[in-house]
Image (cartoon, helix red, strand yellow):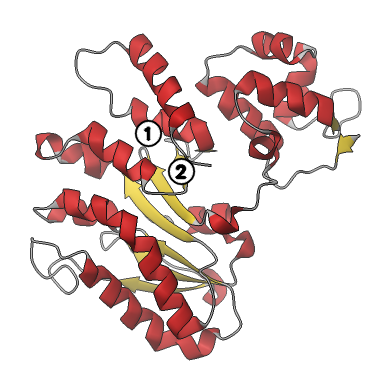
């Protein structure tokens, strides 16, 4: 039996991202999965040299790849239903500027309209009325002072949703709040915002049920590594990374070249940026590999 192509996510990119995160060569992965190196290359490139088309991949091969990469077949093909895992951590390793296009591309397949809270440092534009874009300037509610009350963010969100609720009846509405790390840099109690992620998603569900009579299609919280790094010794950066990962249902990383990784590969990438001083890259890689397997993120 072969999997239909294309799969619900880019299988080749997923295999390549996971292989790279594990420091496996194409040959090593091929040997572990019981296939040829050329076949792995064809899968990763999405094109077979003999046919010019994407190769068909059998369940046996998918099982071998998943075993070799330490994940499930669903992780590779995107077949898992993420309806119950809609609280997503979007971590930008080195991304300045607007992010709406990235958010919509990666998470918008099941979204008819976005409530998009922009990073106030960047102007965002959504094409064709794709989103209601809000900006909450630092220094104004809900960030009126440098001592943040995280519950004020939910109040501000509810006000924004209530204003447009009548126009969104029957639509699948997603939320993306992209100012998270900008706020961390601004306030004095950055750790409180990170801890509040535990309660955030249930608050979003309440607002969606009350005003839209539906579940949120997805709830994306965006953080930029440059902001976290800029906080320096004022926060525990490794602890912050671990808390962010554990407080979300899924992790996605935007790399410096705009490539996107998810799942265990994303966790390893986030933790790699939090490597403590004095720990070698090789030793930290082994530690984060084990940590990624134990953290409950899809």
Q: Which residue is mark 1?
A: 270
Residue 45's x, y, as percent? 72, 29
Q: Nearer the viewer, residue 152 or 101?
A: 152
Question: Is 143 on the left-hand or right-hand side of 91?
Answer: left
Q: Nearer the viewer, residue 9 or 204?
A: 204
- Determine whether the residue tagged by mark 2 lies in a helix, strand or loop: strand
Q: Nearer the viewer, residue 222 or 296?
A: 296
Indicate whether 45 appears above or below 80: above
Q: Nearer the viewer, residue 131 or 276?
A: 276
Residue 188's x, y, as percent? 8, 53
Is the residue marked by circle 2 packed among few (<14), some (14-19), or many (20+) residues within 10 Å? Answer: many
Indicate whether 204 appears above or below 60: below
Q: Which quadrant: the N terminus?
A: top right
* Picture disc at residue 251: 2
Q: Residue at x 44, y 21 (%)?
A: 290
Q: Tell me if residue 260 can be seen.
A: no
Q: Residue at x 33, y 55 (%)?
A: 198
Q: Residue at x 24, y 35 (%)?
A: 239
């Amino acid at each position: 039996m072969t999997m239909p192509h294309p799969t619900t996510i880019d299988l080749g990119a997923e295999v390549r991202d996971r292989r790279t995160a594990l420091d496996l060569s194409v040959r090593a992965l091929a040997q572990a999965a019981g296939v040829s190196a050329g076949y792995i290359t064809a899968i990763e490139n999405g094109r077979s040299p003999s046919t010019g088309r994407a190769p068909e991949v059998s369940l046996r091969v998918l099982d071998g790849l998943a075993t070799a990469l330490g994940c499930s077949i669903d992780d590779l093909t995107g077949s898992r239903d993420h309806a119950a895992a809609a609280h997503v951590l979007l971590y930008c390793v080195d991304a300045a500027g607007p992010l709406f296009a990235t958010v919509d591309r990666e998470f918008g397949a099941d979204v008819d309209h976005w409530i998009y809270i922009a990073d106030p440092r960047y102007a965002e534009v959504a094409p064709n009325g794709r989103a209601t874009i809000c900006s909450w300037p630092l220094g104004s509610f809900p960030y009126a002072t440098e001592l943040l009350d995280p519950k004020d963010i939910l109040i501000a969100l509810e006000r924004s949703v209530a204003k447009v609720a009548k126009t969104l009846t029957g639509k699948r509405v997603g939320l993306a709040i992209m100012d998270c790390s900008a706020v961390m840099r601004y306030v004095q109690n950055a750790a409180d915002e990170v801890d509040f992620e535990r309660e955030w998603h249930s608050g979003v569900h309440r607002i969606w049920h009350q005003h839209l009579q539906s579940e949120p299609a997805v709830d994306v919280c965006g953080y930029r590594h440059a902001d976290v790094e800029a906080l320096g010794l004022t926060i525990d950066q490794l602890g912050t990374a671990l808390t962010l990962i554990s407080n979300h249902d899924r992790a996605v990383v935007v790399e410096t070249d705009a490539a996107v990784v998810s799942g265990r590969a994303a966790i390893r990438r986030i933790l790699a940026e939090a490597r403590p001083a004095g720990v070698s890259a090789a030793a930290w890689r082994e530690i984060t590999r084990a940590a990624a397997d134990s953290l409950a993120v899809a």
